Image (tube, rainbow, N blue to C red):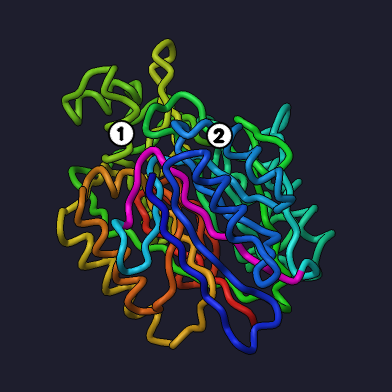
Amino acid sequence: MQSFIYLKRISNCKIMIAQSFVSTGISALDTQLSENINDFFQPNLAFVFSSVEMDIEKVRKVFEKHDIEVFGVSTCGEIFFNGQNEGIYQNSVTYSLVQMNPKVFAGNLFSGVNINSHQLGVQIGTWGNQQFAKPSFLVSISGLTANGQEIVEGIQEVCGEEATIFGGLAGDDARFEETFVFNQRSLSNYGAVVVALDSDAITMTGLATSGWIGIGSDKIITKASGNLVYTIDDEPALKVYKDHLNIRDEDLPEIGVEYPLLIKKEGREILRAVIGIDREQQSLIFAGTVPEGAVVTFSTSPGFEVVDHTRSDIIDFFNDDKKTMLLLLFSCMARHKALGPIIIDEIREIYENTGTPITGFFTYGEIGNNRNMSCEFYNETCTLAVISEK
């Protein structure tokens, strides 16, 4: 059993105190909570990132005992870095406990059953507006057919395009079988867990950076609906992927995450990764919308240059001397797979610019506000949420 603890106290703190952990066992998790909840630290919110190997239901029940609002999600690897420990974990649970004024946050779990992704986003946005005049959102989504872009657009339909949203798609240790989100009361394999923050009291900013580059010639999406792509250049999408990458059916969807489509959209480039296939229809399921008629190309990691790109963006972002009290990182599982152990370099860069520990997870897709302060759904990014008091 391993466990690491970090407590950040700010003497004039009126709203937030944060404490972070990692554990590789249910009993250790229970012990950590029992030993660290006391008269001086009484958390009422937890951000929990757990491998499916830990048994998500057992993890949930540990937090339920302590009456803590939970933002919980299954992962493709867990992140906790405080400048001393390993930083990247498998088959573990990492989490941040937060003691926060209950008037400035609210949590909820949405089942997502019998509605599409856009409708789920509208539900989330409507609920958020009922909590605060100007909510910002942390959102994680389960379900391997969920459309992350449509959920973002649903929230924006209610709250406006300027709404601040960060989060990611749940993972399942790259099995592509079943993913989960959960709070302290229940879990869902096809829904969303959400924390809304009062933007008048809590500031949330961040960045999303990638470094992936396009390869090969441009292609056209000739038949698609939402995040389902049926044909590329009038050929079955599955066949195009297999021929281009010289792979077999059984190599997808995992290898497709490493070679996403790069969509050329209004002067911007957005990446979309394969998260499922339909062999009968020879179609591909992507993590977010791929518009019919879109110009696309395949993309890949250029290797070490990705980390250099990310580190430069992180330094630029923190040049404004941002106050940080809680850092949550949503990083694509393909970054970990492509970069291997050097991915810790970009995580370390975040820590060295803030001195604040980082918790998070490797995802099947990321949500975050870009440099233009508009929110997008991404793949292959390192997406960081920075949370602090105003």
For residue 293, which numbered disc appears in the image? Answer: none
- Residue 264 on image: x %, y %: 37, 52
Tag 1 and tag 2, C-beta contact below 8 Å: no
**Front: mark 1 or 2:** 2
In the foreground, 325 or 282 = 325
Mark 1: which secondary structure?
helix
Crowd band around label 2 with a 10 angstrom C-alpha radius: few (<14), some (14–19), many (20+): many
Measure the C-alpha gap from mark 1 to mark 2.
26 Å
**Which residues are the magenta region?**
87-101
Q: Amino acid at mark 1?
A: Gly
The image position of residue 113, as x and y in percent, is 71, 29
Image quarter of residue 129:
bottom right
- The residue wearing badge 1 is 256
Q: Position of residue 311 (x, y in %)?
A: 27, 70
The quadrant of the image that shows the C terminus is: bottom right
Task: Identify the residue at horizontal 65%, vertical 68% (top origin).
Answer: 41
- Mark 2 — residue? 56
Q: Is residue 140 above or below residue 15?
A: above
Let me know if residue 225 appears in the view: no
Residue type marked 2: Ile
Q: Is residue 250 covered in magenta?
A: no
